[in-house]
Amino acid sequence: MAPLCEFGDLVQIKKQLISVISLCKDRGLLHSAKWASELAFALDPLPKDELPSPPPFTEEDAQDLDAVTLAKSYFDLKEYDRAAYFLRACCSQKAYFLYMYSRYLSGEKKKDDETVDSLGPLEKGQVRNEALRELRVELSKKHSAGELDGFALYLYGVVLRKLDLLKEAVDVLVEALHALPLHWGAWLELSNLVTNIDMLKSLSLPDCWVKDFFMAQMYTELQMIKEALQKYHSLIQGGFSKSTYIISQIAVAYHNIRDIDQALALFNELREQDPCRIDNMDTFSNLLYVKGMKPELSYLAHNLVEIDKYRVETCCVIGNYYSLRSQHEKAALYFQRALKLNPRCLGAWTLMGHEYMEMKNTSAAIQAYRHAIEVNKRDYRAWYGLGQTYEILKMPFYCLYYYRKAHQLRPNDSRMLVALGESYEKLSQQGEAKKCYWRAYSVGDVEKMALLKLAKLHEQLNESDDAARCYMFYIQDIFSCAEQLEHAEVSTALRYLGQYYFKNKLYDEASLCAQRCCDYNDAREEGKALLRQISQVRDQTETPSADLFAPLSNNNTPVRRVSPLNLISFTP
């Protein structure tokens, strides 16, 4: 594919976007039209003589013009059955798509209305779109005859996905993309069906500039954030530097890797460029929640209420605001309101699960997390939430299953690994627990708990050399990020190391640990007692001193005299 940075290519892309916006609007595909419009706005305007010509108008289009115009007016007012009735005898491709799409949306609307009436967790799964089977039969016949255009193939793929015929859905959506590669809705539907990177690589996708946007989206979904950011930055350099869509996606990517400050900066930039934007503001509110920024979250909630109080994102932002204020019943109420507006809102199900957890309603939390997984099986937060609820219920085998799922989705997230280690520990699988804790430390332990848990596990198993080694790493880790004064468990590590060094007759090191113990209230008495013991034996044994908190190196480590404590070669 030719590089995007050539001006001629950008002109061609702009023309293609203008054309596809018109095609999508004519067929009621508003989200695809919005996506293309945002991208087109980010590119320079075209001179009048370079604007694309309208699509060819066939004899069938002319015959169906009045019926399509009438039906489209009903469609826009969400009178889908009425629109379908007036399109039933039309022959053109556009009319056929609108006819089938109206029937599909009519079924979805009826399903959503029933879902709102029975939003109780147990009943929801029984509500179905009754039109899907009929649509599948009719579309299948047309597909076999080769009579479906790119838009109709997209609808056929959507119907197959809704019927859980996933393999067939993938094949049809790929066919739709080859027929019409500029339709973003088809790319998005396909992204919901790709489960891993191997499946993504196996797809035969059209060689079109939209593929770069799709790959960036997929990398984000598959938690391959480094690759996603590279893609988005290359698109920015290629000419889409003004695209608010790309800025929002980069912000979401940083949110996914918990680079909160970077994500917040991008969302604030996005708000400056597009102050009435509601898309992705629920993700922005998640970041403000994590940082405990009450005034900013309150301002965002009030601002969105003024713009549109009945948007799903607005309800989620208000829910987060009340959750931050520890008003969990009110928060759950707003997440329920979000789900009445859109029962397939992934974030609302997950956040509602969190609120039920706070309210100690584990049964409702489990149902909420399960619904989140129904919407998107790649939502690691829902799998992790299920693990936490079963942990509260003291069901470690269930915990293990759900934490494993979360870990598969986020292999480099230390929180998943620590949770897995705890589950293995409860199941007396200490070997597996050790591997999980060490791996959590290796990938970057965000909560600084993995080494502590590993050290305590070694201590329980009477593996004193390994326990001392882990406590050493732990103390150096905590001291290196200046958290030693706030972190309560440092005293535990110092206490153990003091006793360990004393037993190994390394009295200077033991003395240093004991002195440090005196800085902590819960270890002060033990530190003083150890200092008294050391003073009694100091005259008998002289040992060269070592700085316990010096950086690790081959030649300078506080445990160099005890052969099992070779820090360089340590793996559990």
Image (cartoon, rainbow, N blue to C red):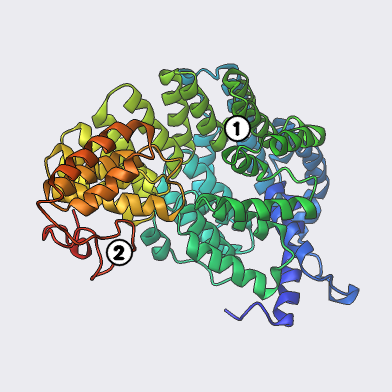
Q: Residues within 10 Å of mark 2 (few under 14, many from 20)?
A: some
Tell me what residue is drawn at x 44 percent, y 56 percent.
171
Question: Where's residue 152, x and y in %?
Answer: 60, 51
Tell me what residue is drawn at x 54 percent, y 31 percent.
351
Name the mark on residue 552.
Answer: 2
Image quadrant in which you'd find residue 533: top left
User: Mark 1, mark 2: which one is toward the viewer?
Assistant: 2
Question: Where's residue 95, x and y in %?
Answer: 71, 48
Callout 2: helix, strand or loop? loop
Q: Is residue 243 left or right of residue 216?
A: right
Relative to residue 7, is residue 322 depicted above or below? above
Image quadrant in which you'd find residue 321: top right
Pick the front one: 289 or 193: 289
Name the mark on residue 108.
Answer: 1
Pick the front one: 144 or 411: 411
Question: Which residue is at the far front?
Answer: 539
Callout 1: helix, strand or loop? helix
Question: Where's residue 344, x and y in %?
Answer: 56, 34
Tell me how many marks there are: 2
Q: CA distance from mark 1 to mark 2?
A: 62 Å
Q: Is residue 56 left or right of residue 480?
A: right
Amino acid residing under circle 1: Glu
Q: Earlier in the sequence, mark 1 or mark 2?
A: 1
Amino acid residing under circle 2: Leu
Relative to residue 166, is residue 205 depicted above or below? below
In this view of the protein, can residue 468 be seen by the observer? yes
Tell me what residue is drawn at x 24 percent, y 44 percent.
454
**Quadrant of the image containing the N terminus:** bottom right
Relative to residue 162, is residue 17 depicted above or below? below
Tell me what residue is drawn at x 55 percent, y 32 percent.
131
